[in-house]
């Protein structure tokens, strides 16, 4: 099969640092090429994943009518040159609009909150040759009222990059791994760790200015270096695997409706249970009492930390293997590609 992938023009594929969906695209491309499929990528000019054909967006902006038109026309040119059996877009829906009336088979994947008139228009234009996916049923539920066919395909982790650790010491730290914004709940994580008498390692970056920088300076910074609270900064893949694998639990008590959150199955892959809140897609990822706990505030957060001994780290790893691994998720996309063929 000939597959043309698109990624937003912001970050290369694979990313050099942050870039969750770009990692997903990179892994899918490598997996499908190894299986004998021909793959084309339209993405940022610094993209380096090996492909059978590669094209670059002419405009690296993701907003504005001129940028959208230029990139939409670039996609149409790439389709004419590569002649794919399917286009799999992880980029802006507007780039597809010149393509949809041609009845080119298209899969449009959403990793973020969605909805609105543009989505409804695309569903009408694409008809039966357009398939939507969401990274969770939560995201699909946002899109379905606008029309079109929706299938949830979860994001995945590459298990070989996240070694399983079957046991950790009794005094293993808790780990918060995410951006240090208020919606991710790092201040609540600090409060829970302090009240539990547990060491907490914060790993992630923070805003350089604005309200979120003020939040960091006010709620997070004063605790760093006190009461067992440490900040590791932004970490790469190897450091992330070591942190997660050596943690008693990953503690990320979110305050927003998370579309998916790849860090949650990453923790499970290491055998590390998750303490978080039942918002957005999290009920689709974490099984309470089996792979983690859901909490609502400080008191039940402390109670969850005290119950970590009830959880089996091997069950966490199995959940990642059975539901959130590349060999499980890549065939789901391939089945959608085949369903769109004439």
Image (cartoon, rainbow, N blue to C red):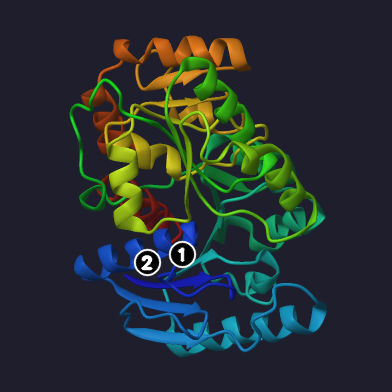
Q: Report the Cα–Cα distance between label 1 and label 2.
A: 6 Å
Q: Position of residue 194 (x, y in %)?
A: 53, 22
Q: Residue at x 60, y 46 (%)?
A: 180
Q: Secondary structure at mark 1?
A: helix
Query: Please, is residue 103 above or below residue 82 in the view?
Result: above
Q: Is residue 114 above or below residue 23?
A: above
| Above or below 152: residue 4 | below
Residue 97 percent location from the top left of the image: 69, 71
Residue 129 appears left or right of 66: left
Q: Which residue is mark 1?
A: 22
Quadrant location of residue 300? top right
Quadrant containing the N terminus in the rendered view: bottom left
Q: Is 296 positioned to the left or the right of 268 in the image? A: right
Q: Considering the numbered disc 2 on the image, is that residue within a helix, a strand or a loop?
A: helix
What numbered label is drawn on residue 26?
Answer: 2
Give the residue at x 35% y 16%.
290
Q: Residue at x 65, y 66 (%)?
A: 92
The residue drawn where x is 41% and y is 21% is 292
Tell whether label 2 touches label 1 (CB within 8 Å): yes
> Is residue 154 something that shows in the picture?
no
Return the residue nearer the eye: 84 or 287.
287
Q: Around disc 1, counting alpha carbons within 10 Å, would you say few (fewer than 14), some (14 to 19), or many (20 or more)?
A: many
Give above or below for 196 relative to 141.
Answer: above
Q: Measured from the top left, where is residue 304 in percent x and y?
A: 46, 13
- Residue 242: x and y in percent read 28, 46
Q: Nearer the viewer, residue 319 or 154?
A: 319
**Viewer-proximal residue, 189 or 257?**
189
Q: Answer few, some or many: residues within 10 Å of disc 2's Cα (few below 14, many 20 plus, some between 14 and 19).
A: many
């Amino acid at each position: 099969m000939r597959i043309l992938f698109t990624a937003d023009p912001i970050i290369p594929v694979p990313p050099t640092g942050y870039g969750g969906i770009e990692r997903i695209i990179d892994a899918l491309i490598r997996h499908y090429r190894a299986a004998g499929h021909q793959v084309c990528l339209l993405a940022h000019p610094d993209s380096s994943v090996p492909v059978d054909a590669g094209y670059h967006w002419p405009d690296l902006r993701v907003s504005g009518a001129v940028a959208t038109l230029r990139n939409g026309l670039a996609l149409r040119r790439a389709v004419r040159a590569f002649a794919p059996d399917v286009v799999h877009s992880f980029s802006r829906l507007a780039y597809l609009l010149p393509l949809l009336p041609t009845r080119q088979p298209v899969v449009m994947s959403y990793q973020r909150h969605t909805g609105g008139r543009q989505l409804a228009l695309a569903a009408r234009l694409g008809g039966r040759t357009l398939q939507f996916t969401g990274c969770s049923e939560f995201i699909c539920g946002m899109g379905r009222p606008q029309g079109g066919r929706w299938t949830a395909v979860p994001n995945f982790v590459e298990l070989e990059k996240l070694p399983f650790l079957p046991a950790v010491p009794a005094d293993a730290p808790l780990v918060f791994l995410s951006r240090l914004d208020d919606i991710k709940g790092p201040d609540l994580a600090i409060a829970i760790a302090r009240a539990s008498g547990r060491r907490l390692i914060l790993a992630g970056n923070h805003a350089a200015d604005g309200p979120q920088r003020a939040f960091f300076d006010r709620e997070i910074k004063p605790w760093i270096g006190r009461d067992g609270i440490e900040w590791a900064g932004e970490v790469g893949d190897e450091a992330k695997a070591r942190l997660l694998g050596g943690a008693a639990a990953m503690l990320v008590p979110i305050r927003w409706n998370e579309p998916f959150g790849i860090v949650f199955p990453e923790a499970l892959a290491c055998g590390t249970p998750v303490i978080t809140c039942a918002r957005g897609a999290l009920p689709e990822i974490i099984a309470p009492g089996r792979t983690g706990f859901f909490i609502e505030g400080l008191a039940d957060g402390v109670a969850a930390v005290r119950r970590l001994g009830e959880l089996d780290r091997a069950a966490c790893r199995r959940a990642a293997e059975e539901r959130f691994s590349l060999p499980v998720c890549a065939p789901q996309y391939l089945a959608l590609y085949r369903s769109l063929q004439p």
